[in-house]
Image (spheres, coloured by chain):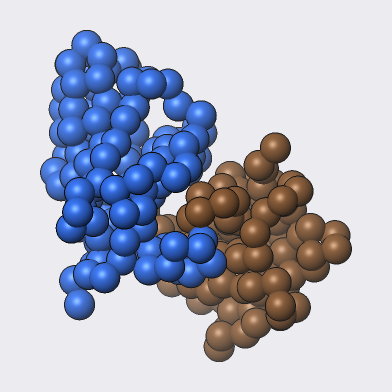
Amino acid sequence: GENVEQHPSTLSVQEGDSAVIKCTYSDSASNYFPWYKQELGKRPQLIIDIRSNVGEKKDQRIAVTLNKTAKHFSLHITETQPEDSAVYFCAAVWGYNKLIFGAGTRLAVHP
Amino acid sequence: KAGVTQTPRYLIKTRGQQVTLSCSPISGHRSVSWYQQTPGQGLQFLFEYFSETQRNKGNFPGRFSGRQFSNSRSEMNVSTLELGDSALYLCASSLDAGGNTEAFFGQGTRLTVV
């Protein structure tokens, strides 16, 4: 079935450290894998995405890697800052714009 | 360019009542999806509409329904409300029909059923 598993559920780091969040997906997902950041009381915001024709994509301090053979993809945040504290969701797409989300990772960055 | 707009922002309803939520997508976006967000179940897909047609449906009971109008605005309806329907309901709009483009979320409607 359509499923995305996300780990860890919580992550606590010191400011300046790196944070890594990992996701795996089940069969038949499409070729698009977005990541969303949701701050308390706010809407999910797309922060980066990757398509299956690339293995890695970077945007400043954020990078995402994709391994389609192993069916997993990861989010890497370097030089974390307190404003990176939020819940992060990975997702995969099945069919037409059907986003299946991971359970979320609550990231806390301590000054 | 205006973002995705959802109304109302907050709703309080009584068990057994019905409710209608509205979503206006980004101009030019024709795909609208709906999600339910709860602390226990996370973000769950409800359904997706494109050109007034429902193309995808999640695993929710028939009490949850939706529709899309010719201007791409969408509504979702929940009938016979239950306490467990209390949640943040989010809609997202996308430009492309194929599922490989960015989905942008509205601020959501927080529904409380008492």
Measured from the top left, where is residue B46 in percent x and y? Answer: 42, 38
- Residue B82, image x, y percentages: 31, 15
The C terminus of chain B: image quadrant? top left
Front residue of A100/B100: it is B100
Colour in which the image shows chain B: blue
Left or right: where A81 falls relative to B5: right
The answer to whether any part of residue A8 appears in the image is no
Give percent across and percent down for residue A95: 57, 51
Residue ranking furthest to the right: A69
Compared to residue B38, the image places residue A14 above or below, namely below
Residue depicted at 31% across the width and 66% down the height: B29
Q: Position of residue B7 (x, y in %)?
A: 15, 47
Asked if B80 appears above or below A104 in the picture, the reply is above
Q: Is residue A3 visible?
A: yes
Query: At 35% from the left edge and 45% from the top edge, which residue is drawn?
Result: B53
Give the residue at x 53% y 74%: A48
Write down which chain is painted brown.
A
